Image (cartoon, helix red, strand yellow):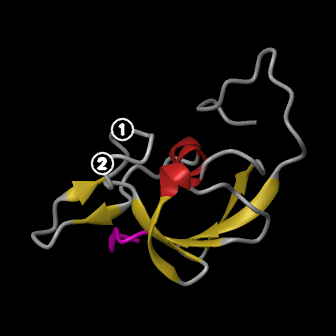
Amino acid sequence: MDAARIEHGVRRPEPVEIEVDGAPVAAYEGESVAAALLAAGVNVFRRTARGAPRGPFCNMGVCFECLVTIDGVRRERACRSVVRAGMRVETGDGAR
């Protein structure tokens, strides 16, 4: 499906669609939102007050650099949130 995902020897369910900043993105239920965004080429998840881009750093919920809005709930950690079909994700990138 995507060059950014490991495919060989991995069994996954059928892809589902999530919405990221208003655009459809293919993802797999059970993977982290951070993994789905990175595989889709989204690497800026938010911006600091001074406009510096931020994205996943630790990928285990410690650094809080991957904060996004999920289904209207602000400041969710993308690395600790699990993809569900139809979820709406908003980054704080502002470049979109």
Residue 29: give its label.
Answer: none
Percent of width and height locating residue 84: 75, 62
- The answer to whether 72 appears left or right of 7 in the picture is left
Q: Which residue is mark 2?
A: 63
**In the image, residue 40 above or below residue 78:** above
Relative depth, front residue between 58 and 1: 58
Horizontal arrangement in the rendering, residue 80 relative to residue 14 (left or right): left
Say which label, 1 or 2, has the lower sequence index.
1
Which residue is under mark 1? 58
Confirm whether the magenta stretch covers residue 34: no
Could you tell me if the residues under marks 1 and 2 are in contact, i.e. CB atoms within 8 Å? yes
Secondary structure of the residue carrying tag 1 is loop
Residue at point 76%, 36% (across, down): 1
- Relative horizontal placement of residue 39, taking residue 29 as reference (left or right): left
Which residue occupies 73% across, 54% down? 26
Q: CA distance from mark 1 to mark 2?
A: 6 Å
Inspect the image, locate mark 2, and give the three-letter code of the amino acid beneath it: Cys
Q: Position of residue 80 (x, y in %)?
A: 53, 52
> How busy is the neighbourhood of tag 1: few (under 14 within 10 Å), some, or many (20 plus)?
few
Kindly identify the residue that appears in the image at 47 percent across and 52 percent down.
Answer: 42
Residue lying at 36% horizontally and 72% vertically, measured from the top left: 92
Give the residue at the far right of this rendering. Answer: 14
Residues shaded magenta: 91-96
- Residue lying furthest bottom: 72
